[in-house]
Image: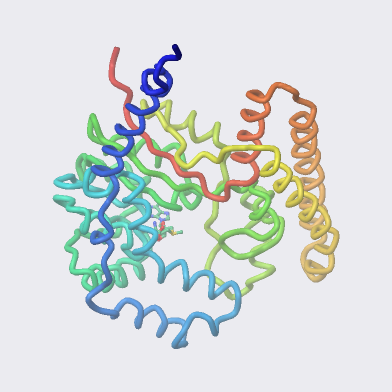
Amino acid sequence: MTRSKWLDPRRMVHGVKWRAQKQVARFRTPSPVIGGPPQGDSFRRAVLAHYGVEDSASLPETQKMWADFTLTAAERGFTAVGMLGGTYALKGKRVLDVGCGYGGFMVAAGRAGAREVVGIDTNPRVVELAPLLLSDYDVEARLEQVDLIDPAVPARLGRFDVIICNDVLEHVTNVEAAVGNLAAMLARSGRVFLEIPNGNAVKYVRSDGHYKIPGITLLDFEDARRLHQAFFPDATAYDTYFYGTVDYYLAAFSRVGIMLRMLAVPHADPATVELLAEEVSALQSASEEWSMVHADKPPELMAEIQERLASYLAEVNNRLARYRGLSDPAERELVGTSLRVSYEVGNWLFEGHRPEPG
Ligand SMILES: C[S@@+](CC[C@H](N)C(=O)[O-])C[C@H]1O[C@@H](n2cnc3c(N)ncnc32)[C@H](O)[C@@H]1O
């Protein structure tokens, strides 16, 4: 007689895992009520007034990207806070939003029940606009115009249970000092949430996430600054100082005792890796027209971009060839995932904490 399928140990393990996951989902998924709509629209009106439009759809491409990034600050904050565990993770906690921008992550932390929300940013305009968003969502927070890399900041602000640092590390002049201060402000059992753009993502090499300039993410800061100035002579200073690799950030945080774990790591099956390969080919074709896009730009910068692009493409294509040559499915999955993390994911998400001693 065959044993009941329900007594199959694999099924039983599966059942227990399924029930456990359901419980975790029940308690950890933030209620959508946390998000909720804002009670006012003073922030939205102020942002659109700044751009002189009634709707961001009427703006030129790059300005529309900036306006939409600003206008979606709260939605982006809710998503990030949801990934951290929503109310479950933030209720009663002391939360710091570093490079808080327009306050969207502070709004989300406040709505998730944080005991105290503090936001810091170097940009005075931000420190004027963020209170509008906070008041539209009826969230109280302390805002300070300070620089993350200032050595006096940890003593001034104290320690936090949760630190959010979203799209900021690429803008600091000294990543090591920034990471040191983040560690100094993280409570013993605290957690840090980071979003960091990947300068090697094919989509950002093709058109960067800050200015939509082709090839700029491949350049060192000084050349990137000159290229940006050639594109936008009247714009404010270029402030994307550094695009690091995953290894770089893991090492930088590890040195100060924080272990990072990547969130939302993509799975890689052959179809998704081949889609990435198509993107790489499309980048190669698009780059053949860059000399026209860049016709009036400094020729030595164009030459530098083409040289760096050639090495970049050689490396990606080598890794794709290695992937295609693998026969072991588990190894293919691993190498494919690494390819997607290195060249496809546009913005890496990390959660960091101090490992338990011993
Ligand atoms: C791309 S914006 C991100 C804003 C916000 N975190 C978000 O995701 O909506 C980067 C922000 O970091 C701020 N920033 C850059 N360097 C900083 C530093 N050294 N200390 C504090 N804030 C900084 C900028 O002023 C800007 O508001």
Q: Residue furthest toward the front?
A: 1
Q: Residue at x 61, y 35 (%)?
A: 337
Q: Is residue 160 above or below residue 322?
A: below
Foreground residue, 301 or 243? 243
Which corner quadrant of the image does residue 15 belong to? top left
Foreground residue, 160 or 55? 55
In this rendering, would 239 be left or right of 178? right
Say which quadrant the N terminus sits in. Answer: top left
Q: Position of residue 272 (x, y in %)?
A: 66, 44
Q: Position of residue 164 (x, y in %)?
A: 34, 48
In this rendering, would 284 be left or right of 160? right
Q: Residue at x 22, y 41 (%)?
A: 160
Say which quadrant the C terminus sits in. Answer: top left
Q: Position of residue 174 (x, y in %)?
A: 47, 43
Q: Residue at x 42, y 32 (%)?
A: 260
Q: Position of residue 114 (x, y in %)?
A: 18, 51
In this rendering, would 98 be left or right of 40? right
Q: How many numbered dots are placed on residues in this image? A: 0
Q: Residue at x 18, y 44 (%)?
A: 93
Quadrant of the rendered image holding ligand 1: bottom left
In this rendering, would 32 be left or right of 284? left
Foreground residue, 11 or 181? 11
Q: How is the image coloured?
A: rainbow
